[in-house]
């Protein structure tokens, strides 16, 4: 059974940093691209970042480019998101999502999602 | 402002069919057959319902179907059931630069 468990959320002041983690199990982690998708309170889904299965390719939304860094440790089946220079508008539930196709594909089709971790940026 | 445009809400009675539209541009929906649809119940994670425009993942009811015409994709739910009441989001690949865009979401109410 595929499981994705996010952690690391919390309350942080504007300008601060936070590191999110996603522990994956139930599938061959290194074979699949992984993404972070966020949802501000009462709002819709917003794609944040994607990393290919090998870690060789990364993609970022313009809203986080230069502030957030996605990474993965395939030996530990873990995806991470380092978030720096946080702003109030980064407040959201952050979901870790597995891509549907494996074998090097990084097409944005998300077949499994974690339960999310809440990040609140406020003074 | 979301990149893909969806109606804010739709409604239907049990047993009826409804369609949710998702309008993009020639840079996303119109250029790729890579629209996916997600169902989200309150305080739950999204669930993949349709991918690559019209394909259903294993376990998703055949009451859910997807299609596309030009720059607009559509999700149709037939034989509406109470458990279909949820928010629905479309999503499209948008090329290697923008990569992916979501719609603003549509709240489905089963009357």
Image: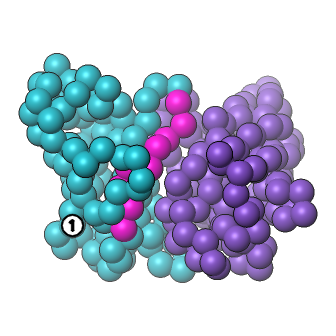
Work out whether residue A85 or residue B28 is closer to the camera in this orientation and state it.
Answer: B28
Q: Please say if A81 is above or below B28.
A: above
Q: Is residue A67 visible?
A: no
Of residues A47 and A27, the one nearer the viewer is A27
Q: What color does chain B have in the rendering?
A: cyan
- For residue B4, above or below residue B80: below
Across the whole image, how many numbered discs are drawn on residues?
1
Highlighted range, magenta = B44-52
Task: Look at the image and say whether residue A24 sits in the magenta stretch.
Answer: no
Image side of residue A107 versus residue A69, left or right? left
Q: Position of residue A83 (x, y in %)?
A: 80, 50
| Snapshot quadrant of residue B18 | top left
> Residue B54: image x %, image y %?
28, 63
Q: Which of the image's four quarters has the N terminus of chain A? A: top right
Residue A63 appears in which quarter of the rendering? bottom right
At 11% across and 39% down in the image, what residue appears? B17
Q: Nearer the viewer, residue A120 or A30?
A: A30
Q: Is residue B111 above or below residue A40?
A: above
Residue lying at the far top in this picture: please name it: B111
* Residue at x 78%, y 73% (from the top left corner): A55
Subunit bearing disc 1: B
Q: In the rendered image, which residue does mark 1 sit on? A: B68
Placement of the C terminus of chain A among the 4 image quadrants: top right
Q: Secondary structure at mark 1?
A: strand
**Chain coloured purple:** A
Left or right, A62 with reference to B84? right
Q: Tell me which residue sits at (75%, 50%) in the image.
A: A25
Give the residue displayed 76% in from the left and 68% down from the top.
Answer: A30
Query: Residue B39's spot in the image, x, y percent?
Result: 40, 41
């Amino acid at each position: 059974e595929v499981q994705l468990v996010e952690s690391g959320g919390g309350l942080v002041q504007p300008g601060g940093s936070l590191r999110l983690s996603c522990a994956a199990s139930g599938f061959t982690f290194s074979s699949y691209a992984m993404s972070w998708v966020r949802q501000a309170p009462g709002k819709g889904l917003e794609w944040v970042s994607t990393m290919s299965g090998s870690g060789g390719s990364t993609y970022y939304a313009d809203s986080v480019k230069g502030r957030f860094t996605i990474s993965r440790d395939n030996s530990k089946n873990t995806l991470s998101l380092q978030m720096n220079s946080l702003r109030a508008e980064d407040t959201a539930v952050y979901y870790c999502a597995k891509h549907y196709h494996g074998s090097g594909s990084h097409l944005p089709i998300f077949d499994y999602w974690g339960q999310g971790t809440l990040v609140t940026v406020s003074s | 402002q979301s990149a893909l445009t969806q109606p804010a809400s739709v409604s239907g009675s049990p047993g009826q069919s409804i369609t949710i539209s998702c309008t993009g541009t020639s840079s996303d929906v119109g250029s790729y057959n890579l629209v996916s649809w997600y169902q989200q119940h309150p305080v739950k994670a999204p669930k993949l319902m349709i991918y690559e425009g019209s394909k259903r993942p294993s376990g998703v009811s055949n009451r859910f179907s997807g299609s596309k015409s030009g720059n607009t994709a559509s999700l149709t739910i037939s034989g509406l059931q109470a458990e279909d009441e949820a928010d629905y989001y479309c999503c499209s690949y948008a090329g290697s630069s923008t990569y992916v865009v979501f719609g603003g979401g549509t709240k489905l109410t089963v009357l």
